Amino acid sequence: MSNVFIAFQDNEESRPVIEAIAADNTNAQVVHSPGMVKIDASGSLTIRRETIEEITGRPYDLQAIHVNLVTLSGHIDEDDDQLTLSWRH
Amino acid sequence: MNIDLQAREITPLRNTFAHVAKYIGDEKAASRYQEATIGAQPMTNFQYRPTWDPAHEIFDASRSKVQLADWYVLKDPRQFYYANWTMTRARQQDAVESNFQFVNQRGMVAMIPDAVREKTLEILLPLRHAAWGANMNNASIAAYGFGTAFTAPAMFHAMDNLGVAQYLTRLGLAMAEPEVLDVGKKAWLEAPEWQGLRRYVEDTLVVQDPFELFVAQNLALDGLLYPLIYGSFVDDHIALQGGTAVAMLTAFMPEWHDETARWIDAVAKAAAGESDANRQLIAQWTQHWSERAQAALSPVARLALGEHGEAALTEARDKLDARCRKAGVLA
């Protein structure tokens, strides 16, 4: 199965996003490198707004991930509640 | 010459301060909320007892009858510390500011029928003084309470209440002449409908136990007042009779109430969950003060909504009781 990945700048704002991804995707591998956190996953990877909100305790606009987003690979399927990366069409 | 640039990762030896790590462990980085809150409460090595209260230390958990082994369990689910609280409120302030601009530019106040406008001012303006009382009470919780996790959000809450009072003042100035503020104050001081609520506010000003004050002000009174006034009165009654502008100008209040209710419920839940003694104490305060708050708001509800007032207030009370049951305060 092919891999997808997403990378964020390593900072306070992206930390709950990364925690949420790690909690929601058991297949995700979080790799810390200087200044950046890359998350690899085989098959697909989902970011769920609800999980981030549980961690931060505040409403979260999923579009805010773009502030700290470095790069990603995979086809994007996104709406207000989730963003999924996979190679499916 | 060949220069080889390499990125080298330097991992920190410690993820957070030792006093924070004591609570959450050192395995992962602490959030700003944790670092700004945990360990901030002065605990020991006080010098003299305050002359104004020699029975207690200057910071003393025994000012409240509620007993907790660790006051940091009263965490704020919104994870507010000074910086993100101000940023959140600044965003909300921008939204309200543009609402005021929208209403002013389009002359929306002039479109409100006179009777609706007068009713709005009659109900909302005396509430400036209730919001000021809430400000004083939360400042008192912040001053005499124990544990930064509990007192810091109480101070934010105090300033939020001041904001509510200011929005009501601005609403009065946007909808009428400045004299309307004096009329509101006179009603608060003299009109029979307001005396029950005024008495409630003034009685809470002298409640000594910070946790009882928290229950009386934030849970019982605000838990009834905000759904009644900003839900049933403004949104369901005034807005439907051509007073949409009023709902725009008070947009902050219901939004803020829903947000802060999560903090209030979480604090009540954590404190009540610690021991049966706490639960009984908080349940008793909740019963006592919500009975009183309901009685105090009853004439206000009738003034605002006429014969439907009582039903709207009962509905608010049911909602509050449901909140308390969910928090494990009431059985």
Image (cartoon, coloured by chain):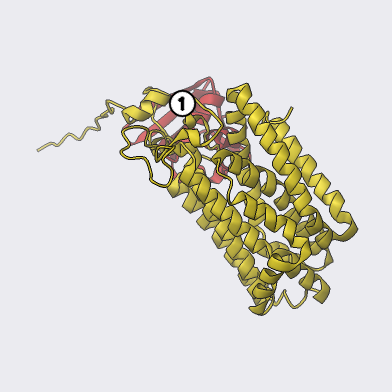
Chain colours: A red, B yellow
In the rendered structure, the answer to whether residue B153 lies left or right of residue B1 reads right
User: Within 10 Å of the Cα at label 1, are there few (<14), some (14-19), or many (20+) other Cα atoms?
Assistant: many
Q: Nearer the viewer, residue B6 or B68?
A: B68
Q: Nearer the viewer, residue B103 or B257?
A: B257
In the rendered structure, the answer to whether residue B37 lies left or right of residue B323 reads left
Q: Nearer the viewer, residue B137 or A61?
A: B137
Callout 1: chain: A
Q: Quadrant of the N terminus of chain B?
A: top left
Q: Is residue A63 above or below residue B194?
A: above
Three-letter residue code for mark 1: Asp
The image position of residue B96, as x and y in percent, is 60, 62
The image position of residue A9, as x and y in percent, is 39, 39
The image position of residue A38, as x and y in percent, is 41, 30
Q: How many marks?
A: 1
Residue with the mark numbered 1:
A40
Q: Nearer the viewer, residue B294 or B35?
A: B294
